[in-house]
């Protein structure tokens, strides 16, 4: 492929895709970035095109008709549906894993079996398709226990159960109910792990990989990490939770065995591998694999990279060797998610969003759940609406910038946590 004057198509509509579009647009190799379908805020900055991300033929026809040179697939659903396969087979390079590799996110049961087969540390578990076998297994489990819908559930298919009754109910709701549809037709029951979570993102090309800055996100809706799970209320990077020595050990015990195991199983993994880790008293254990950049982690880890990422994404997509390491800024970044009050349950939409005319220095507005109304005004259109990003020489200065930006953005039901990165500030 011609790697100059590139026309890049970013697939997706959230904060992750807005960030990816911005990163691609900074590249001297890129002539134009188009986002499909995008959102209201993205449309004010980039050309957007209507697109059903679950329709592979529509993705392919759009890429062909627009003369796209390279596609970056953002969300997990098109990856699990094989969007990369259909694009690559048509001669259009695409960043992200193929359908076979995307099973690492598309099926938690597949992933747990993979981890067990290759002796990669994770929680003890069982996979079940019937209530009877699952409930029998639960009778022997220590509490609390974790019940997961095996398929994609938009971050909502994980239930921590403190009693047998809660666990039995969760299993029945998934396997016999309709709460999670096809995603809940198989369940994973896991040992509950205690410790701190952290996110390790890799860009991979087979067994070749580069690491991105370690980050930590905040999944609970309430300050102090209480309340319901969300898609993520904020994140920061890097984190003192993981030293360079610790990261090197994780690569030895988890990263390399994972990529070697995939190769052994006939899977050529290209794209992002996001490893959710629980740092327990017995060492790091894999909580989950995702096969795309995290959201909101993307908003803090990619801006910290101090080099053109487009050639790295292309080399990953083509299965070429990657650089030994990425150049990373000696800075910190925080994103605070501005949500609609009521999220992750019911929440209002269509509220006009008032944005500052000028951004504070080292700040960035990332659009997640926004659209344009009939008057071409940006309005809320989701639970997570805006990401307010701050960067600085220290985590404290990054935090100050992010929260200063939060105060300058307004919509009626605006809600955000005021304690993002609180764990980091409590570390000695």
Image (spheres, rainbow, N blue to C red):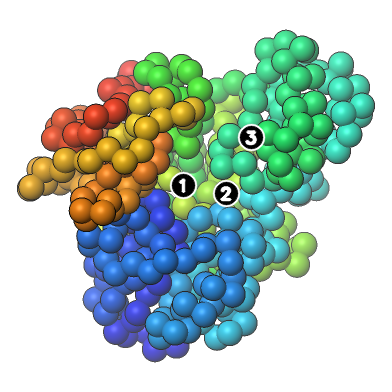
User: Height in image: 398 above or below 212?
Assistant: above
Q: Is residue 422 left or right of residue 210?
A: left
Residue 390 can be seen in this image: no
Q: Earlier in the sequence, mark 1 or mark 3?
A: 3
Q: Check whether the beta carbons of the residues at disc 2 and disc 1 lie within 8 A of each other.
A: yes
Foreground label between 2 and 3: 3
User: Height in image: 417 above or below 187?
Assistant: above
**Crowd tier of the residue under label 2, counting other residues whose Cα lies within 10 Å: few below 14, some 14–19, many 20 or above:** some
Q: x and y percent of residue 162 in the render?
A: 68, 12
User: Height in image: 123 above or below 382?
Assistant: above
Q: x and y percent of residue 416 in the render?
A: 30, 27
Foreground label between 1 and 3: 3
**Crowd tier of the residue under label 3, counting other residues whose Cα lies within 10 Å: few below 14, some 14–19, many 20 or above:** many
Q: Which residue is mark 1?
A: 294
Which label sits on residue 428?
A: none
Which label sits on residue 290?
A: 2
Which quadrant of the figure has residue 268? bottom right
> Which residue of the protein is positioned furthest toward the bottom in this rendering?
2
State the CA–CA distance, disc 2 to disc 3: 14 Å
Quadrant of the drawing holding the C terminus = top left
Helix or strand or loop: what does disc 1 sit on?
loop
For the point 71% across and 28% down, which residue is it? 147
Quadrant of the drawing holding the N terminus = bottom left
For the point 24% across and 29% down, which residue is it? 412
State the CA–CA distance, disc 1 to disc 3: 17 Å
For the point 62% across and 41% down, which residue is it? 153
Q: Which residue is at the front of the view, 340 or 241?
A: 340
Which label sits on residue 157?
A: 3
Helix or strand or loop: what does disc 2 sit on?
strand
Q: x and y percent of residue 195 in the render?
A: 55, 23
Helix or strand or loop: what does disc 3 sit on?
loop
């Amino acid at each position: 492929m011609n790697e100059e004057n590139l026309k890049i198509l970013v697939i997706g509509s959230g904060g992750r895709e807005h960030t990816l579009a911005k990163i691609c647009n900074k590249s001297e190799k890129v002539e134009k970035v188009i986002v499909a379908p995008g959102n209201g805020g993205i449309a004010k900055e980039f050309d957007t095109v209507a697109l059903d991300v679950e329709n592979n033929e529509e993705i392919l026809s759009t890429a062909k008709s627009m003369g796209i040179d390279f596609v970056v697939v953002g969300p997990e659903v098109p990856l699990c549906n094989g969007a990369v396969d259909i694009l690559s087979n048509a001669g259009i390079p695409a960043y992200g894993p193929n359908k076979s590799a995307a099973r690492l996110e598309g099926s938690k049961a597949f992933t747990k079996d993979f981890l067990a087969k290759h002796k990669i540390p994770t929680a003890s578990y069982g996979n079940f398709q019937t209530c009877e076998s699952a409930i029998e297994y639960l009778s022997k489990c220590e509490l609390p226990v974790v019940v997961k819908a095996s398929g994609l559930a938009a971050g909502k298919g994980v239930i921590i159960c403190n009693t047998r009754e809660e666990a039995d109910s969760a299993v029945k709701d998934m396997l016999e109910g309709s709460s999670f549809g096809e995603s809940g037709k198989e369940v994973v029951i896991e040992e509950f792990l205690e410790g701190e979570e952290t996110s390790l993102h890799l860009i991979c090309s087979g067994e070749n990989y580069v690491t991105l800055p370690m980050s930590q996100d905040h999944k609970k809706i309430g300050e102090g990490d209480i309340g319901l799970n969300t898609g993520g209320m904020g994140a920061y990077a890097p984190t003192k939770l993981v030293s360079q020595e610790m990261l090197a050990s994780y690569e030895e015990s988890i990263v390399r065995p994972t990529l070697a195991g995939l190769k052994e199983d006939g899977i050529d993994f290209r794209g992002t591998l996001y490893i959710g880790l629980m740092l327990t008293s017995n060492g790091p254990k894999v909580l989950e694999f995702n096969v795309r950049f995290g959201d909101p982690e993307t908003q803090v880890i990619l801006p910290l990279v101090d080099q053109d990422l487009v050639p790295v994404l292309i080399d990953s997509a083509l299965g070429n060797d990657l650089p030994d390491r990425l150049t990373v800024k000696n800075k910190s970044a925080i994103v605070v998610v501005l949500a609609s009050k009521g999220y992750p349950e019911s929440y209002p939409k269509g509220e006009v969003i008032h944005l500052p005319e000028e951004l504070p220095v080292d700040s960035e507005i990332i659009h997640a759940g926004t659209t344009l109304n009939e008057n071409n005004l940006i309005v809320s259109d989701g639970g997570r609406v805006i990401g307010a990003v701050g960067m600085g020489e220290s985590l404290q200065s990054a935090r100050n910038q992010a929260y200063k930006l939060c105060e300058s953005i307004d919509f009626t039901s605006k809600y955000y946590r005021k304690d993002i990165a609180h764990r980091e500030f409590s570390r000695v």
